[in-house]
Amino acid sequence: MDFGLSEEEREVRDWVRTFVRKEIQPLEPEVLRRERAHQPGLTRDELTSLQLKAKESGFWGVQTPEEYGGMGLGAVLTALLEVELGRSFVPFRFGGDADNILYFANEEQKQRYLLPTIAGERRSCFAITEPGAGSDAKAIRCSARQDGTDWIINGEKTFITGGNEADFTMVFAVTDKAKGADGGVTCFLVDRAAGWRSEYIDTMGEWGPAALVFEDVRVPKENILGEVGRGFELAMKWIGRGRYLLPARALGGCERLVEMAIGQANTRVTFGEPIANRQAIQWMLADSAVEIEALRWLVLHAAWVVDQGGDSRHWQSIAKLYGGVKANEIVDRVLQIHGGMGYTRELPVERWYRELRLLRIYEGTDEIQRRTIARNLIKGHASVSGTLG
Ligand SMILES: Cc1cc2nc3c(=O)[nH]c(=O)nc-3n(C[C@H](O)[C@H](O)[C@H](O)COP(=O)(O)OP(=O)(O)OC[C@H]3O[C@@H](n4cnc5c(N)ncnc54)[C@H](O)[C@@H]3O)c2cc1C
């Protein structure tokens, strides 16, 4: 058993580590200042210029297949890279990627949606959640009815990431009520120009998702992604595409936070001694280090199963659940070690605290991950002996 990195993995990881340290972390004070003033941390131009800088070194379309101009990296490498990006709260991501389900587009749709998205010319959003259907995604009611060769969409979506900025949406609508999610949901590619509108939702995070409203939005049949009635499968493919990446990013944040906590513990003196000398503080650091280590291997293991081509859902759920719960415990301890300063907006700890909270909610809540894990065990799809058998 080899827990080491290959030369290629080490090189890629080290390049990203340096990029984050040299290009991204120096932006943190300004990003924080802007966010405190209710402005976007990074402007679109700044993000694009950082992305182009990375592109010069080949970092473009990390998981985009090589025939589409991407790097086509596997899951383990992508996870390693995501951990490094997670070491900063600056909302940076490499350019050149597109939603996995856009690859199911036909040739004409690829020209209109997939390729411009990879090129960064168009932005997409994935819209399934509704006010009455979140965890229970099969309960969606947004509908599409046929009118000649067109479809007319009516309904509301909510909490849609990027919904305010998107040029088009991949929206999931019921096209056959009797069949519902089992053959009666269809995915439509709908340009904003077709008439849907978005409304910003203020959250405790630094950016807000959107509610999308469809009122008699007409789309031609050419805009159906995949097949009529097969949309729910596409939605599940989108959600399952990389659950391990969310805890990977959180892992990087936790590493950075605990480093900050160690610095604070060594320098903050109370009752004549650095607080690092107190067992209460040491135990918080020790527990955090143990959990970070456990999370690292859960994430890399889930990514490894993805790379093996096996059914990774169970292992991804385990990594996502553990990452969500533990990252929140860790950031809470780090805030505690910083005392009153941890609670202020002078330090980014409270920012991380708010951001990491989301991990327990989106792309499947803690409870839904537990439900998946338990069901797999009870039905015998997975075993507590793990993948070693
Ligand atoms: C910032 C943000 C971004 C998002 N981005 C997107 C996006 O881009 N696209 C998109 O479609 N959606 C998006 N979502 C929606 C997100 O996926 C849902 O919020 C999430 O799935 C939970 O659904 P819900 O909010 O309706 O909660 P509910 O489903 O109403 O759940 C409420 C509570 O009940 C629990 N619960 C529900 N069912 C069970 C059960 N069977 N057993 C035990 N407990 C249960 C949940 O775990 C939760 O604690 C986003 C949400 C947020 C907050």
Image: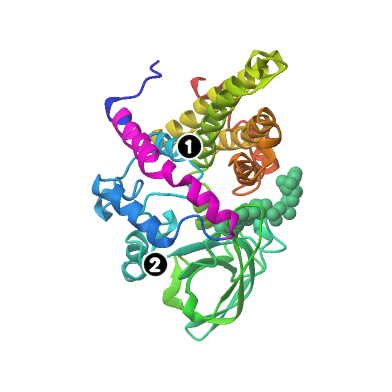
Which span of residues is magenta-colored?
A: 10-38
**Can you tell which mark lies on residue 122?**
2
Q: What residue type is labelled 1?
A: Arg
Q: Most extreme residue toward the bottom, as rendered?
A: 148
Cα gap from disc 1 to disc 2, whole angstroms: 28 Å
Q: Which amino acid does label 2 sit on?
A: Arg
Residue 370 at least partly seen = no
The image shows residue 284 at horizontal and vertical percentages of 66, 21
Residue positioned 58% across, 37% down in the render: 320
**Can you tell which mark lies on residue 387?**
none
Compared to residue 1, the image places residue 225 above or below, namely below
Q: Nearer the viewer, residue 348 or 328?
A: 348
Per the image, is 209 magenta? no
The reply, left or right, for residue 378 in relation to residue 312 is: right
Please report whichever mark, 1 or 2, sits nearer to the chain's N-terminal start: 1
Residue positioned 38% across, 64% down in the render: 105
Q: Name the residue under label 1.
A: 87
Within 10 Å of the Cα at label 1, are there few (<14), some (14-19), or many (20+) other Cα atoms?
A: many
Compared to residue 255, the image places residue 46 above or below, namely below
Q: Main secondary structure of the magenta part?
A: helix
The image shows residue 243 at horizontal and vertical percentages of 52, 42
Residue 149 at least partly seen = yes
Q: Which of 112 and 82 is in front in this view?
A: 82
